[in-house]
Image (cartoon, grey):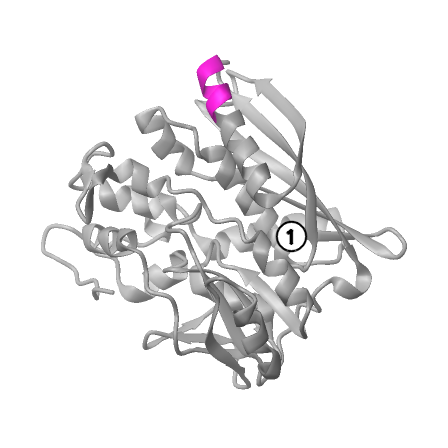
Amino acid sequence: MTEGTETDDEEGLTYAGTGVDIDESEAATKALIGAAGEFEGDYAGLVDIGDQYLALATDGVGTKLLVAEAIDDYSTIGIDCMAMNVNDLLATGVEPVAFVDYLAVEAPDEATGEDIGAGLREGAKRAGVALVGGETAVMPDVIEGLDIAGTCAGLAPKDAVFPGEAEAGDAVVGWPSSGIHSNGLTLAREAVTRNYEYDDPFPPNPDQSIAETLLTPTRIYSEVLAPLREVDTHAAAHVTGGGWTNLTRMGAFRYEITDPFDPQPVFEFVQEEGNVDDEEMHRTFNMGTGFVAAVAEEDAEAVVEASEDARIIGYVEDGGKAVSVRGLELQE
């Protein structure tokens, strides 16, 4: 990536500076969880139902909606909503089985509803889950435009759920992202609209507009579950808000990343247009790697061989809670 440097007329952007402070967000989330009571699980809540866990995850797509609104194309947003929930269950070792959506709108619009519904159906197909309906709420006094969120339910035998804690000596297996996914769009939008409009051609690929590039759907990683369950998988992580610091959710270790996937051109474009430094980029975006797992070193090659595009990207070491990647030392 290009090292961001400040210019005389345009200050370098940060995620917090554009209105999203990851530390404050996590603190608020922990406060909410504390008020609601204790539950098992990190990426998903686990409910003991005998010999299995019922798992639940809920999420939305954030300000990616504003990009869709700008070009009046919501056809991929449903895929993102599905992906953000399904991938969290997969990171727990749970098989997703059903999804329910919640659409809140300022005013009902049939065409928009059809677009979102088509995306949800496509997402459900990719994830292999049942789409069991949902709720549309018309709330003009509360909502400006629209917002969509969803909840995914999954089931897993108790011995199939990943322990959630990496071990020193583990290999880190990674899978590439499909692009910017559904995190960091507040920063990305601020960066790219400094000098461009959303419907302008995307400079690295003029056949596609900037908006279409930003709206590339989040990858759904359903295919990772089977190979990870076949080996000694200790933990997994869906690389979302917080970027590469998400790896520390697998435990307080040093994650030495020696072979990350290359970032897609959208990341360099955002970095250059927003004058964003390398550390901020890696703390905000997936930077080309969307899903990771910490597995016993002797099992790593089996996972790679069973996956179409996985590879070993690094190792887990003792020595603090940090991620070392591309010459950066990232701490939560």
Q: Residue at x 12, y 57 (%)?
A: 7
Query: Which corner quadrant of the image does residue 152 belong to?
Result: top right
In the rendered view, does 88 fall on the left or right side of 268? right
Q: What is the magenta range?
A: 110-115
Outermost residue on the left side: it is 8
Q: Residue at x 50, y 32 (%)?
A: 119
**Residue 16 visible at all:** yes
**Tag 1 residue:** 89
From the top left corner, tell me how far across and down residue 131 is, in percent: 65, 32
**Residue 255 visible at all:** no
In the rendered view, does 167 fall on the left or right side of 277? right
Outermost residue on the right side: it is 50
In the rendered view, does 82 fall on the left or right side of 323? right
From the top left corner, tell me how far across and down residue 178 is, in percent: 40, 51
What amino acid is at disc 1?
Leu
Q: Residue at x 40, y 61 (%)?
A: 283
From the top left corner, tell me how far across and down residue 205 is, in percent: 21, 46
Query: Which corner quadrant of the image does residue 236 belong to?
Result: bottom right
Examine the rendered structure and indicate whether residue 165 appears above or below residue 38: below
Q: Is residue 176 magenta?
A: no
